[in-house]
Image: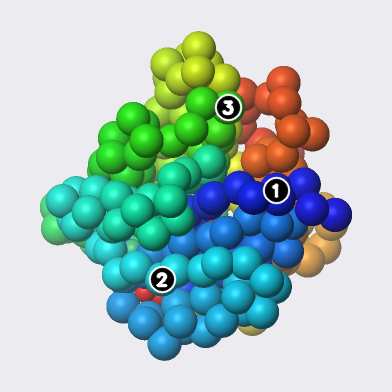
Amino acid sequence: TYRLNGKRALVTGGSRGIGAGIARRLAAEGADVAITYAASKNKADAIVREIEAAGRKGYAIQANAADADAQQAGVNAAIDALGGLDLLVHNAGVANMLPIGEGTMEDFRHQFGTNVEGVFAGTLAAASRISDGGGIVVIGSNASHWTPMPGFAVYNATKAAVALLVQGWARDLAPRGIRVNAVQPGPIDTDMNPADGDLAKAFMDRIPLGRYGTAEEIGALVAFLASDDASFITGARIDIDGGLSL
Ligand code: NDP
């Protein structure tokens, strides 16, 4: 299927994990795709080659989401390269599970800087340039409404913050036909949360569907939300977690 033929998409943090899965799926459905990354230039370049192998244009741009100026410059460079923007996917994020007393102010600022300030700065740069009828998807987390174990407070708070940004932006941008939605994954097998890692030992037995999810499954949901199949969905927060947070 080519539901996104001719669309121009930017995925932040597209060099690895969920963002790479999203970038691949958007390209497979016909979109040109720019990705940003923080440090993994070689991995980002490899994703661009995959996008090009799918017959689409691909671009990799280094942009630290935690630095608002760099994030805005990166978003603007991506839109320039793509020749416009129809879909913005905020995926870049960090997670540090530190119980109160172990986390520092520096860690708090790092998590909020990347997961919240980066999302705000990127949307601010894109808002006037994204085409009417376009879309924004923010990768939040089921942790926006659910605390599985100690240590999640700051990460949860960042994901709750972006869930509310999504709700507000859905109202702000509805007059232009721009739909804004949050995708809220549970455990997805990536470097951040490997299916054979320590967190997985605690999670696996509690996931009703009995397994971790994949970046491909998140990519499929983002492609759906970006497509006309989701033309009446805005301001939604969709859990994609195998039932873990039920
Ligand atoms: P990974 O750590 O596997 O990959 C993170 C990606 O984000 C990389 O491409 C990385 O770039 C990029 N990134 C990280 N920090 C920055 C930064 N400061 N500036 C620009 N890019 C950055 O994470 P996941 O793929 O697992 O997670 C992606 C998103 O999904 C995050 O928002 C996360 O919170 C969310 N999520 C993940 C879950 C999971 O279980 N995996 C569950 C729920 C939500 P580089 O390669 O250059 O470092």
Residue located beneath label 2 in the image = 60
Quadrant including the C terminus: top right
The three-letter amino acid code for the residue at tag 2 is: Ala
- Label located before the other in sequence (3 or 2): 2
Image spot of residue 177 (x, y percent): 57, 20
Answer with left or right where residue 20 lies relative to residue 117: right
Answer with left or right where residue 122 lies relative to residue 30: left
Q: Name, please, the residue furthest toward the front.
A: 83
- Label located before the other in sequence (1 or 2): 1
- The vertical placement of 186 against 210, above or below, is above
Asked if ligand 1 lies within 8 A of label 3, the reply is: no
Q: How many marks?
A: 3
Crowding at dot 3, Cα within 10 Å, few <14 / some 14-19 / many 20+, comes out as some
Residue 229 is at least partly visible in this image = yes
Crowding at dot 1, Cα within 10 Å, few <14 / some 14-19 / many 20+, comes out as many
Q: CA distance from mark 1 to mark 2?
A: 20 Å
- Label located before the other in sequence (1 or 3): 1
Say whether marks 1 and 3 touch (CB < 8 Å).
no
Answer with left or right where residue 82 lies relative to residue 158: right
Image spot of residue 51 (x, y percent): 61, 72
Residue located beneath label 3 in the image = 133
Q: Quarter of the image holding residue 220?
A: bottom right
Secondary structure category for the residue under label 3: strand
Residue located beneath label 1 in the image = 4
Q: CA distance from mark 1 to mark 3?
A: 13 Å
Q: Quarter of the image holding residue 124?
A: top left
The three-letter amino acid code for the residue at tag 1 is: Leu
Secondary structure category for the residue under label 2: strand
